[in-house]
Amino acid sequence: VVFEKSSKASYLVAKEIADLIREKNKKGETCVLGLATGSSPIRVYDELVKMHKNEGLSFKNVVTFNLDEYYPMNAESIHSYHYFMNEHLFNHIDIPKDQINIPNGTIDQDEIASYCKAYEEKIAKYGGLDFQLLGIGRTGHIGFNEPGSHYNSITRSITLDQLTREDAAPSFLGIENVPKKAITMGVGTVFSAKRIVLLAWGHKKASVLKETIEGEISPQIPATYLQEHNNTTFVLDTEAASLL
Ligand code: GLP
């Protein structure tokens, strides 16, 4: 779906999430959300905060799982995805802290595998993700599933691509400060979500979106796997869709 303005698109995505939360609330069920970081979803979070403040949208029955975190990374660092999520969403809504899950960037190296397995099991324990919000990196990554990621991959440690680190460099004030690794949900984890919405804005994403939507499914562009998901929508602005 292509919108002239990302603001309108973000509002409609937030509305879909809010409607899902309300529907689940009515049934007394937990709503399990997979959340993303990056600049693309910021406006969606702003709208959800507004809906919480103005319409009484409650997150008390919402459980969240974030896609990824840099490794190593302290939760308190301004560069962490923990910090990002608190700033843009969690500090402004009524979600209980113990219902928030974000990969831990301080876990010991030799415990990463068991930590990731437990993260995966926790998602499954809640019956899987009801809704997964995604952005896309210029390498074609979703979460931090860089080129080469298997479609069946699960939560794990990954080495970041050079291009991904270059794109992150300005906010880290230099590429030398960007971590070389991350912990990310796998493609398989994302794929198991009942509903997926991928957001992309701006001309810089146009070429990877052309490959993602019109190209052949390939591990070289992990986002192409989404072509086979039965309930995924790409929400783009006109610039991001300009090469389609
Ligand atoms: C990071 C995140 C991704 C995100 C991507 C795009 O690499 N790990 O989940 O989709 O950035 O970021 P942006 O939305 O700022 O373009």
Image (cartoon, grey):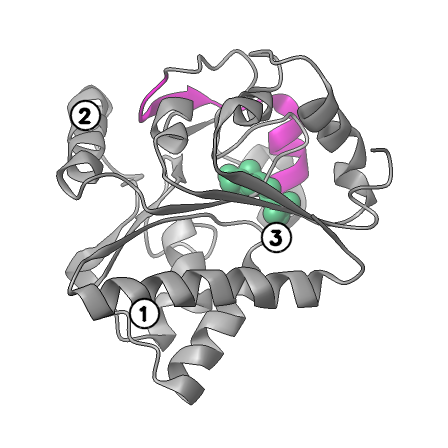
The amino acid marked with disc number 3 is Ser
The amino acid marked with disc number 1 is Arg
Judge from the rendering whether residue 144 lies leftward or rightward of residue 126; answer left or right.
Answer: right
Which secondary structure lies at badge 1?
helix
| Residue at x 72%, y 32% (from the top left corner) | 209
Q: To which quarter of the image does residue 241 belong?
A: top right
Disc number at residue 199?
A: none
Judge from the rendering whether residue 234 lies leftward or rightward of residue 203; answer left or right.
Answer: left
Q: In this view, does 216 lie above or below 71?
A: above
Q: To which quarter of the image does residue 214 belong?
A: top right
Determine if residue 114 is in view: yes
Q: If the image is split into quadrants, where does the C terminus sit? A: top right
Where is mark 3, residue-wise?
Answer: 40
Where is mark 2, residue-wise?
Answer: 117
Which secondary structure lies at badge 2?
helix
Instruction: Give x and y (percent) for residue 239.
Output: 83, 47
Stretch of the chain drawn in magenta: 153-168
Task: Confirm or reject: label 3 Cβ below 8 Å from ligand 1.
Answer: yes
How far, Cα to Cα, is label 2 from label 3?
Answer: 28 Å
Quadrant observed for ligand 1 in the rendered image: top right
Instruction: Give x and y (percent) for residue 92.
Output: 37, 76
Q: Are marks 1 and 2 in contact (CB under 8 Å)?
A: no
Q: Which of marks 1 and 2 is nearer the N terminus?
A: 1
